Image: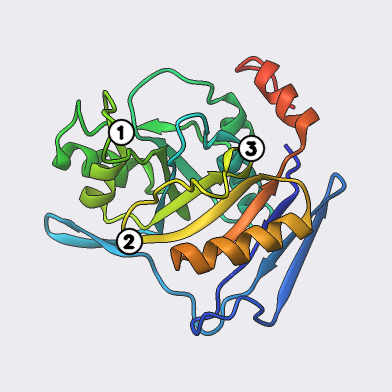
Amino acid sequence: LTPHLTTRRMHPCGNSTGRGAREGWGGGARIVFREPCGRRRRGPSIGWPNSMIQLPRIALGTVQADAETRPMAWALSEAFRRIDVGVQSFLSRAHFSAGGMATGINGRSPRHLDSWLMSADACRALFVYGARSADLAVVEGRFSSSSEEDGGGQLEPLCQWLDLPRVVVLDVTHLEDCRLPNIPPHTAGILLDGFAGARQFSRLATNLESIFRVPVLGGLERMPLLRGAIARASQEQRI
């Protein structure tokens, strides 16, 4: 997977045009990262018997019924791999799914958490154990709206149990000007999926930041041929 991924690192004062861009090239895809200003901040700590653990982590989820996180999660794993950041992914619901692509990117099979099947203590134990050798843990799932009854494990309880910053993936092909989806309270950032080019990304980022008051951290281009190949691929096939 060679993503056309655009990322924006926010300045502590809200300016996303900070200094020190690092560029990576591979497979014809250009990935641009913005260096953060000042020292790197560690992730929040998880309360644990006899110890406090510092573990960088985020929750990556959708709020649209017909959207998914897999393309964005795989692109993020590849982008982090290129800068030597190891990612361990977790799925917010215990089920069999196509994890072969993620394993091929970062060498780690996705693990499972489930707020319906597991207690809070069990989720914390499995999470800490599974992410012990990674630089970043990403919990993937779906943020349920207040009107949506979602069976099985849900992402929102995991955000509370594990103190996960919420990053929302918005599929721009399903956005309507007068009917924007609701995003969870305390959302830390937004990622745009499926935009047509840099001009559309800039326009959407500016509009959504002004509406939601949440920074747009980056995005993944549409790439219909590659997405079609991913949808047709078996779990064992690598693209």
> Residue 214: in sight, yes or no?
yes
Name the residue tied to disc 1. 113
Res 70 → quadrant: top right
Q: Would residue 123 appear left or right of 181 to someone viewing this image? A: left
Image height check: is 147 above or below 21?
A: above
Amino acid type, residue under disc 3 in the picture: Ile
Q: In the picture shown, does residue 211 fall above or below 115?
A: below
Q: Which mark is residue 105?
A: 3
Q: Where is residue 114? Give x, y as percent.
A: 27, 31
Q: Residue 177: where, in percent of width, then height?
A: 57, 49
Which is more N-terminal, label 1 or label 3?
3
Say which label, 1 or 2, has the lower sequence index. 1
Of the two numbered discs 3 and 2 on the same chain, state the one appearing first in sequence.
3
Q: Are marks 3 and 1 in contact (CB under 8 Å)?
A: no
Task: Name the quadrant containing residue 62.
Answer: top left
Q: Split into 4 quadrants, where in the image is the C terminus?
A: top right
The residue that label 2 is drawn on is 186
- For the residue marked with disc 2, what is the amino acid? His
Q: CA distance from mark 3 to mark 2?
A: 30 Å
